[in-house]
Image: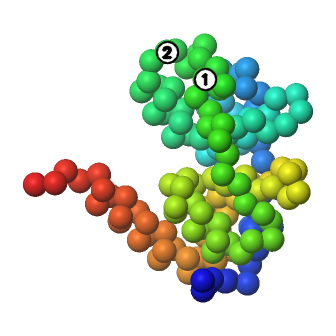
Amino acid sequence: MLRFTTGYTVSDAMTRNPVVISPNKTLRDAAKMMAKEHVGALLVKDSKEIVGILTEQDIVRKGIAGQGNPAVKKVSAIMAMNLVTISPQEDIFEALRVMRDENIRHLPVMHQKEFVGLVTLKDILKIEPDLYEILAEKIELREAERKPSR
């Protein structure tokens, strides 16, 4: 299989110390933390390890639009637990491919079973703006899927 490479690794683009939150915090706490830190995702960490990820889309779709009060609903109730991850040595094009295939925008970075960072679409586009065309194609495909058929 032919693999496209950019010459940049996930390690070059990733955030090394992303913001983390406890699974026992409320969605309101999470939203406030995201606003304060200017991030769109929080890694969820219990006392020892990363156990999930919570995105702003999760809060809107599952927390606010869903049932329950965001002031009392816990992060653990809506966080994604089956994390898709990537190695820091992978090319950023591979990270973009994984994000496209999994329909995600935030990708935890793991090295030898240890969490080492988080890479986002924004991180990738900062380092390699030419990949924007690939991202635009993804958005067009997603919009086409949402339109009702006639």
* Residue 116 horizontal/vertical position (percent): 85, 54
* Residue 35 horizontal/vertical position (percent): 63, 38
For residue 41, which quarter of the picture?
Answer: top right
The residue shown at (23%, 53%) is: 147
Amino acid marked by disc 1 = Ala
Quadrant (top left, top right, bottom left, bottom right) of the C terminus? bottom left
Mark 1 closeness class: few <14, some 14–19, many ≥20 residues within 10 Å: few
In this view, the mark in front (2 or 1): 1
Q: Name the residue under label 2.
A: 68
In this view, the residue farthest toward the front is 1
* Helix, strand or loop status at disc 1: helix
For residue 51, which quarter of the picture?
Answer: top right
Ranked by sequence position, the earlier of labels 2 and 1 is: 2
Q: In this view, does 82 lie to the left or right of 143?
A: right
Q: Name the residue under label 1.
A: 77
**Numbered tag placed on residue 16 in the rendering:** none
Amino acid marked by disc 2 = Gly
Mark 2 closeness class: few <14, some 14–19, many ≥20 residues within 10 Å: few
In the rendered structure, are the residues bearing label 2 and label 1 in contact, judged by CB atoms less than 8 Å apart? Answer: yes
